[in-house]
């Protein structure tokens, strides 16, 4: 088994800082790589990230702004938004040793290329070992050491198992799998479906409607996963159903918050865009290419693009022909 003594976390946002804490608790030497030197210096001096207030950095975490230095670690955690993953991996690639595990920690599909996160990594750094971390979690909970379970996937299940051993601890429990596509579809689709659940809450459609959207959305997720070769147990696991339930019921979810604001007729929340906004149109295009029916996701995409109002989307869903479960 590889030693995996050191971990670099690329991206010093709240989630990156939380995962740096995870790696430190697992006994690794950690480099937290910020986008710019000023941010790195501030975090290093205060031992606290303003994006994750109240959480002190472990002594094992060194904060830097040097991608070349970060690339020398044994494991790379890429904790950037999905649409910025390619740029981060491209910057790292010339400095990476062959076979270095590069783990995407974002949930989405790249616009333009329609590639999943591990596909982006494999294209930008073909000599690296691509993997993905996904599952029901929030940065604040993870950073504070509250119990969390996630999924880590790599095509080589032995590598996935070794990475789990390197990153897991008594409060952070990763499960490993070789079903990379199942984990990626679960993570990407749940962002879109969380927007739908938020709209239902913001529109005050009731708990029954929210539950219906969550369960019908999960059915869509499973259909697409099967069409793309994912395994059913992955869809029903942490990266599929677990992630979906958390995202569709928690105000901490940026996607859910966006949907709730839209449902109330309010402007979209300021700040970072919810990943589901990027993913919705790509997800619908992917489903169409696989001849998979995803009415809830299609309704979200139509609302976000302005081609349908919320009322029109709701009417379209409710007037669909009756059909069998599945």
Image: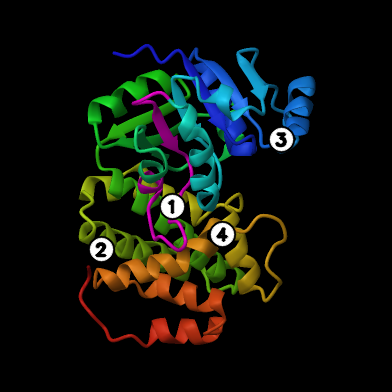
- Is the C-beta separation of discs 1 and 2 under 8 Å? no
Measured Cα–Cα span from mark 4 to mark 1: 11 Å
Q: Earlier in the sequence, mark 3 or mark 4?
A: 3
Q: Residues within 10 Å of mark 1 (few under 14, many from 20)?
A: many
Q: Which residues are magenta?
A: 97-120
Task: Report the disc number at residue 256.
Answer: 4
Indicate which disc, 2 or 3, sits on the residue closer to the N terminus. Answer: 3
Q: Choose mark 4 or mark 2, whichever is in front.
A: 2
For label 2, the SS is helix
Which of the marked residues, 4 or 2, is nearer the chain's N terminus?
2
- On residue 223, the disc is 2
Q: Which residue is mark 1?
A: 245
Could you say which is closer to the camera, residue 36 or residue 235? 36
Instruction: Give the class, few, some or many, for how many residues have Cα within 10 Å of label 4's Cα (few <14, many ≥20).
Output: many
**Residue 207, horizontal then vertical, whole percent:** 49, 66
- From the image, give the main secondary structure of the stretch colored magenta: loop
Q: Up-down: is 250 above or below 305?
A: above
Residue ID for mark 3? 36
Q: Nearer the viewer, residue 284 or 119?
A: 119
């Amino acid at each position: 088994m590889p030693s995996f003594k050191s971990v670099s976390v690329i991206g010093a946002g709240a989630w990156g800082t939380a995962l740096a804490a995870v790696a430190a608790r697992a006994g690794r030497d950690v480099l937290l790589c910020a986008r710019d030197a000023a941010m790195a210096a501030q975090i290093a001096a205060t031992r606290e990230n303003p994006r994750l207030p109240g959480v002190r950095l472990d002594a094992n975490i060194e904060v830097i702004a040097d991608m070349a230095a970060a690339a020398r670690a044994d494991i790379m955690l890429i904790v950037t938004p999905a649409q910025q993953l390619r740029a981060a991996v491209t910057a790292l690639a010339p400095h990476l040793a062959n076979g270095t595990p590069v783990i995407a920690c974002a949930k989405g599909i790249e616009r333009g290329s329609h590639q999943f996160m591990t596909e982006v990594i494999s294209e930008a750094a073909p000599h690296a070992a691509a993997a993905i971390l996904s599952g029901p979690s929030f940065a604040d909970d993870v950073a504070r050491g509250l119990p969390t379970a996630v999924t880590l996937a790599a095509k080589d299940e032995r590598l996935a198992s070794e990475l789990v051993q390197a990153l897991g601890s008594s409060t952070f429990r990763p499960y490993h799998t070789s079903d990379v596509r199942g984990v990626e579809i679960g993570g990407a689709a749940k962002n879109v479906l969380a927007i739908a659940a938020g709209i239902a809450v913001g529109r005050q459609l009731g708990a029954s409607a929210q539950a219906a959207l969550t369960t019908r959305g999960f059915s869509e997720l499973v259909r697409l996963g099967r069409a793309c070769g994912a395994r059913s147990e992955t869809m029903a696991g942490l990266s599929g159903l677990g992630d979906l339930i958390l995202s569709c019921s928690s105000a901490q979810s940026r996607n859910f918050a966006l949907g709730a604001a839209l449902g109330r007729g309010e402007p979209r929340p300021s700040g970072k865009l919810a990943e589901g906004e990027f993913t919705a149109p790509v997800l619908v295009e992917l489903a169409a290419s696989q001849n998979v029916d995803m009415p809830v996701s299609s309704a979200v995409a139509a609302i976000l693009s302005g081609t349908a109002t919320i009322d029109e989307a709701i009417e379209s869903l409710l007037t669909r022909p009756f059909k069998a479960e599945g």
